[in-house]
Amino acid sequence: MGKFHIWTIGCQMNTSDARRLGDGLEAQGFEETASRGSADLLVLYSCMVRQHAEDKVRNQLAELRRLKQQKPATRIAVAGCVGDVDAWQRQYPFVDFFLAPGQDLTVRDRLADLVELDQYYRIEPPDAARAPRISEGITIHQGCNRNCTFCIVPSTRGRERSRAPEEILGEVRDLVRRGTREVVLLSQIVERYGRDLRPRISLAQLLHRLNDEVAGLERIRFLTSYPGDFHAELIEAVATLPRVCEDINLPLQSGDDEMLREMRRGYTVGLYKDLVGRIRERVPRLGISTDIIVGFPGETEAQFENTLAALAEIRFDVVHVAAYSPRPGTPAAIYPDQLPLEEKKRRLHAVEALQKGVAESINAPLLGRTVEVLVEGEAKGKWYGRTRTNKLVHVASSEPLAGRLVDVRVTQTSAWSLQGELLVPAAV
């Protein structure tokens, strides 16, 4: 069948979808290659969430244009977040196929000689000897029905649609057979999973099934959450299911109510704080991360200070901060009072400095404690992995630890990671 090469940028969902597509290609006889020049099929997984990511995609397409000129028989496909497919096709006519999420699969005939596109959403199990990753993302739900004014996802990934639970369980079982120990359930708003299915199923019910029915699976995580949909049933699942990690990603975006209204987020800072309080009350050993946008159009200094105050009060383990990036086609892109780049950078650095101090104070009490770590790999002479609360841990060992659950005594803490010494490793 030939060779394929996949280049991926962006979120874990793109990584998950790229893995599934690669599995499907291999199942049909394709061979993966690290060399673009030797590939018969090149797939570019794109991201349009911020301008910087889009620029990377366009740079890659410029390189692929030159490769196509040198080797016209090479087939090129673009997948992931694409947006206006017709506009992209006009600008990049050398691309043979655009796999836009949610598009009508009747267009599959255009690549019928390369891949059966139905398998882009449902993959037959590949050869079990393929080397696995210890932790794998699983796309369970695509698209978004919300209309946050800064977000391009509804136009790039379409309306919400869920995968059937049996399909998800089958994929997870296959990954576990190949050595995966942890799965991360992925969606733009993960709590919306299953609302479009009949019979309807909730994320909490899916977590129960994965926890109870997949032998050999050690850990389950999920993201990204939305404050308005994080209900009591899900809090209880995190609190009681032994394989579900005490790890929540709950975007705040701004600590100012007026900014949240301008973003159309659908909640207030007070409601957000109340939710975090209820989760922490039921799950005391909770690792919680959030997303923050600084420099949204019209954000005053006082409103930015409200965000800093909220971060200082709530005390997140991790804060993912981004300077606002206008995305064409979104309401906020044409809002007046767009802030200068230098001011957005200043605010971004202020959030980073505050969070560094918060994270250092959260992690410092872990010194001398024993934590359970799922080892994911090796880097710079040390093994690394994560705790159930998603803290990165480095540990030295002469024995192979990849895929093991090990006990580690913490010997050094910092804002970003922990260093530790190996105690007695658990059995594989």
Image: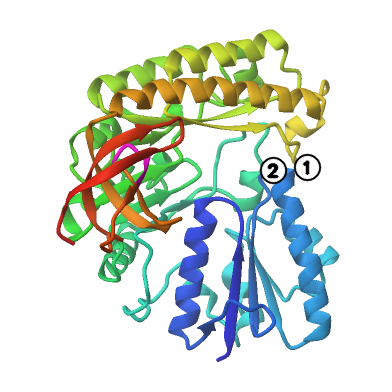
Q: Residue, x 71% and y 11% (percent of image)?
A: 301
Secondary element at tag 1: loop
Residue placed furthest toward the bottom: 1
Q: Which x, y percent locates residue 222?
A: 38, 44
**Bounds of the magenta span?**
388-394
- The spot of residue 307 in percent (x, y) is 58, 16
* Amino acid type, mark 2: Arg
- The kind of residue tagged 1 is Pro
Residue 62: give x, y in percent of width and height.
81, 66
Residue 372 seen in render: yes
Image quarter where the N terminus lies is bottom right
Q: Which residue is mark 2?
A: 50
Residue 328, labelled with which disc?
1
Q: List x then y, in percent, for residue 135.
A: 36, 56
- The one nearer the camera, 236 or 294, is 294
In the rendered view, does 59 fall on the left or right side of 158?
Answer: right
